[in-house]
Amino acid sequence: MELIVLGACGTWPSAAGACSGYLVRHEGFTVWIDLGSGTLSNAQRHTDLLDIDAVIVSHSHADHVVDLLPYFYARHYALGEPHDTPLFWPPGVYPRIGSLLSEESIQDLSSSFLISDVEPGDSFEVGPFSITTAAMAHPVPTLGVRLEAGGVTLAYSADSGPTPELPKLARGADLFLADATWQGDGSRYPPDIHMTAAEAGDAAAQAGVGRLALTHIWPTLEPDRSREEAAARFDAEVFTLREGMTIEVGT
């Protein structure tokens, strides 16, 4: 299984970065997870946009979904109007996206993609992937995602505060992509929005994962400090994600 990082910035993109977005590939099948600002541009460095086989959106916040709109425009107006690409998202995303579209475009979106609402906790299969979801600690319905294929497992927290669902979702995963938006600076952060790097390390240790990849770090923070704070809680490999990285998940 191969992971390509399209965007890893938290909440807003850095000058050379992008918000959340990942391509996951196995046996020639490509899943695009989250379409934050800047990810559409970066995706085209790695794939033809017609070669995306399925899309997963973790939740309705703009830094995870906003590039779905220009991706849809490209598909509908310039790329031969592909139809029925599977698109999975939790309840609440469709109304938010639809509020930015005309009635005609809403209908076109529904034909361009084969849309499925996924309740947190549901499981499904697409291509070679078996996918399990879990409800994350976030203000809107949010899917944590576990992808399994070829004996390899990738877990992704999306946006989440600490929750018992995270160690369950990531249990024994080869690679765990964890929200590490904040650092241990003494601030009192809301408990149900994001994690500090140390809390991401705690979740990885509880889950017994192989490697921990920190993502969604605020662009104003120093990534090395986030890595150090997570590594103090998790004694296996810890690294921070950056745009353009390609990672073999099972190695």
Image (spheres, rainbow, N blue to C red):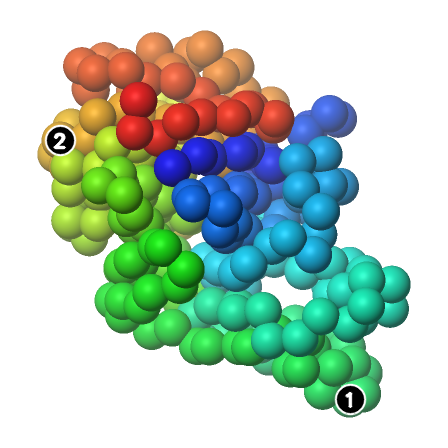
Q: Mark 1 points at which residue?
A: 103
Viewer-nearest residue: 153 or 70: 153
Q: In this view, does 205 lie to the left or right of 54?
A: left
The crowding category of the residue bearing disc 2, from other C-alpha atoms within 10 Å (few below 14, some 14 to 19, many at least 20), is: some
The crowding category of the residue bearing disc 1, from other C-alpha atoms within 10 Å (few below 14, some 14 to 19, many at least 20), is: few
Identity, as a three-letter code, of the amino acid under mark 1: Glu
Cα gap from disc 2 to disc 1, whole angstroms: 47 Å
Q: For residue 151, which numbered disc appears in the image?
A: none
Which residue is at a point 72% across and 87% down the rendered structure image?
Answer: 107
Secondary structure category for the residue under label 2: loop
**First reached walking from the N terminus: tag 2 or tag 1:** 1
Viewer-nearest residue: 42 or 182: 42
Q: For residue 208, which numbered disc appears in the image?
A: 2
Which residue is at a point 26% across and 38% down the rendered structure image?
Answer: 152
Which residue is at a point 75% across and 26% down the rendered structure image?
Answer: 15
Q: Is residue 130 above or below residue 36?
A: below
Q: Which residue lies furthest to the front in this view?
A: 27
Q: Residue 110's x, y, as percent? A: 64, 82
Which residue is at a point 81% across and 68% down the rendered structure image?
Answer: 80
